[in-house]
Amino acid sequence: MRIYEELFIVRADTPEEELDPLIEQLKGVITTAGGTIEKVEKWGVRKLAYRVAKQNEGQYILIVFNAKADTVKELERRMRVSDMVMKFITVRIDEKLKRIEKRKKARDKRAARKPAPQPQAASSAAYLPGEPHASVPGAPAPAMPAALSPAAPAPGVVEPTTPATPTTEGAPAETPAS
């Protein structure tokens, strides 16, 4: 059996004394065919989106039930024949529930497959507040001490400079002979 929603609109001026036997008749059709009624809701009088059978308002009734396709055909036949019913729609909702259940299972399966992220454990090396750790991305490289730097002269040592040779305009520069 499948799950269906039957929503129908009856005339707004229909009294409760006539409406209740119609609902009981529809419930009887469902139960005699082996179906079960899950809920019956009277939504009351509401304004229609457009005029139907020269009416601007109608009473909405919702019936949710489990039944076979033959039962639904019989319900729809009875509603077409009834003068009180202006409009009706039958929707099979078990496929929608199946899709929702399938999505939920896939979501749960993905969640079980992907473990939750673990927090980063602190390494055994102690970080000094003034010095960045080598493994920290984006941290500057530690500075080399001045004694090991090849570009810096040793303290107290003066480097010899080479004298510049004077050149004259237009004349080629002379290089000292060796």
Image: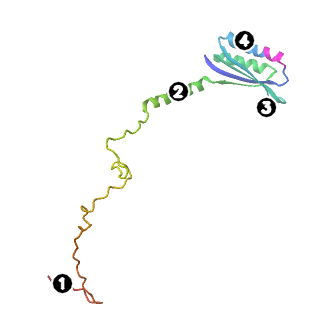
Query: Considering the image in quadrants, where does the N terminus appear?
Result: top right
Query: Going by the image, does 150 lie left or right of 10?
Result: left
Q: Which residue is mark 4?
A: 28
**Crowd rating for badge 1 (residues with CA inside 10 Å; few <14, some 14–19, many 20+):** few
Q: Are marks 2 and 4 in contact (CB under 8 Å)?
A: no
Residue at (60% x, 23% y) in the render = 94
**Crowd rating for badge 4 (residues with CA inside 10 Å; few <14, some 14–19, many 20+):** some
> Which sits earlier in the primary sequence, circle 3 or circle 2?
3
Q: Which mark is residue 176?
A: 1
Predominant secondary structure, magenta span: helix
Q: Which residue is mark 3?
A: 48
- Specify the amino acid type for callout 2: Lys
User: Looking at the picture, does residue 130 appear above or below residue 15?
Assistant: below
- Specify the amino acid type for callout 1: Pro
- Specify the amino acid type for callout 4: Gly
Q: Which mark is residue 46?
A: none
Query: Going by the image, does 119 lie left or right of 22?
Result: left
User: Looking at the picture, does residue 148 appear above or below residue 81?
Assistant: below
**Crowd rating for badge 3 (residues with CA inside 10 Å; few <14, some 14–19, many 20+):** few
From which residue to which does the magenta span run?
Answer: 15-21
